[in-house]
Image (spheres, rainbow, N blue to C red):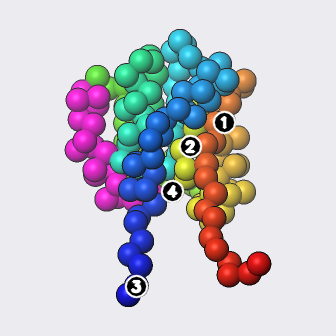
């Protein structure tokens, strides 16, 4: 019998206390309590951006390469969108159309590891960050049994 695999986005969404690292990270980055313009790379269904806006005065642009996930984000978080502090966009992190130096910070929740061309993504981070801006990456590692001792 073949083992059925859970999609990565669903597995991430089910983690207990999944935004604990993000909360700690925004404190360490010096973002807590400030009015900032942030970019989320790999937003999936948009939960992290919506979570951050519950207690912070940010303007967040959240992108994901999957149109299906962006559509889910738009559907699930439409009340947050009505305040115009949050925008969900289907885009590729390797080539973004945003103006240079347009964000105070960039963050990514469990999305950097699977990106195929990390160098291009890092170049975009650098291009988009304002002077003094910070990047916050919370990621994961997948452990597999290799069958070797």
Per the rendering, the mark at residue 108 is 2
Secondary structure of the residue carrying tag 3 is loop
Instruction: Kindly report which numbered mark, 1 or 3, lies closer to the viewer in this rendering.
Output: 3
Q: Which residues are magenta?
A: 64-82
Up the image or down, 90 lies above or below 31; here it is below
Tell me if label 4 and label 3 are in contact, CB under 8 Å. no
Q: Secondary structure at mark 1?
A: strand
Would you name the residue on which mark 4 appears?
A: 92
Most common SS among magenta residues: helix
Place of residue 33 in the rendered image (x, y in percent of width and height, measured from the top left) = 53, 12
Dot 2: few (<14), some (14–19), or many (≥20) neighbours within 10 Å?
many
Instruction: Name the quarter where the C terminus is drawn.
Output: bottom right
**Disc 2 and disc 4 in contact, CB within 8 angstroms:** no
Q: CA distance from mark 1 to mark 4?
A: 17 Å
The residue furthest front is 149
In the picture, which quadrant includes the N terminus?
A: bottom left
Residue lying farthest to the bottom in this orientation = 1
Residue 100 among those drawn in magenta: no
Q: Is residue 103 visible?
A: no
- Residue 133: image quadrant is top right
Q: Nearer the viewer, mark 2 or mark 4?
A: 2
Residue 77 in the figure: left or right of residue 10: left
């Amino acid at each position: 019998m073949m083992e059925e695999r859970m999609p990565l986005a669903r597995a991430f969404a089910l983690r207990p206390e999944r935004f604990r690292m993000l909360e700690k990270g925004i404190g360490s980055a010096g973002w807590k309590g400030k009015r900032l313009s942030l970019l989320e790379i790999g937003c999936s269904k948009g939960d992290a951006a919506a979570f951050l806006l519950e207690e912070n005065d940010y303007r967040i642009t959240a992108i994901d390469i999957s149109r299906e996930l962006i559509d889910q984000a738009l559907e699930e978080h439409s009340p947050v969108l009505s305040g115009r502090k949050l925008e969900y966009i289907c885009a590729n992190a390797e080539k973004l159309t945003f103006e240079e130096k347009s964000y105070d910070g960039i963050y990514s929740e469990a999305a950097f590891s699977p990106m195929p061309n990390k160098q291009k993504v890092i170049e975009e981070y650098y291009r988009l960050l304002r002077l003094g801006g910070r990047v916050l990456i919370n990621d994961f590692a997948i452990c597999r049994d290799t069958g070797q001792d």
